[in-house]
Image: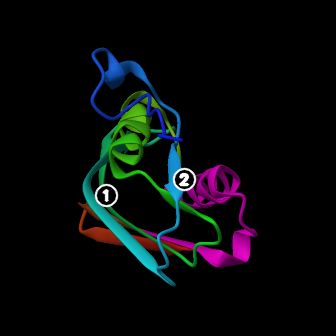
Amino acid sequence: MEREFVALGHAGSDAYAGLESFPNPGVERVELQSDELTAFCPITHQPDFYTATITYEPGPLCLESKSLKIYLSRFHDQGVFCEALAVQIRDEVAEALRLDRSRVHVTLRQKARGGITITAST
């Protein structure tokens, strides 16, 4: 049976903010990295720019990368602290892949603002 993806290859997929998966072809570890994650400080409303690294030990499912790209873009207009965002992403990726949270690791490196760089890891 062929898998039907919502985000991958369909018109209007940019509005889709869900995480999609596909059957694991046999890999033991996956690492995805994006430097396109942005949010803003919930106090100052200053923009925050991140490099996100998501590493997981897949079970029967792997994360489809285009859905992840679209999912990460949804944080652009949200006010959230770096540490809370790392936890939220970890929890939502674990849920989408039906994994225990201990098998998903997220590292967010916030680009320097005010001379300070923050790195939050789960």
Question: Is the residue under label 1 in contact with that under label 2 (CB below 8 Å)?
Answer: yes
The quadrant of the image that shows the C terminus is bottom right
Residue kind at label 2, given as amino acid type: Leu
In the displayed structure, 83 sits above or below 19; it is below
Q: Position of residue 7 (x, y in %)?
A: 38, 31
What is the C-alpha distance between the residues marked 2 and 1?
11 Å
Q: Residue at x 48, y 40 (%)?
A: 3
Q: Position of residue 55 (x, y in %)?
A: 47, 74
Q: Is residue 69 visible?
A: yes
Q: Which mark is residue 85?
A: 2
Q: Would you say 112 lies left or right of 121 here?
A: left
- How packed mark 1 is, by other alpha carbons closer than 10 Å (few <14, some 14-19, many 20 or more), is many
Q: Give residue 118's position: percent from left, percent from top.
A: 39, 70
Query: Looking at the image, is 85 positioned above or below residue 53?
Result: above
Residue 94 on the magenta segment: yes
Q: On residue 50, which mark appears?
A: 1
> Magenta includes 84?
yes
Drawn side of residue 36 relative to residue 95, left or right: left
Of 11 and 72, which appears nearest the observer?
Answer: 11
Circle 2 packing at 10 Å, graded few (<14), some (14-19), many (20+), is some
Check the image and name the residue furthest to the bottom. Answer: 28
Q: In the image, which residues are magenta?
A: 82-107
Please tell me whether the stretch drawn in magenta is mainly helix, strand or loop.
helix
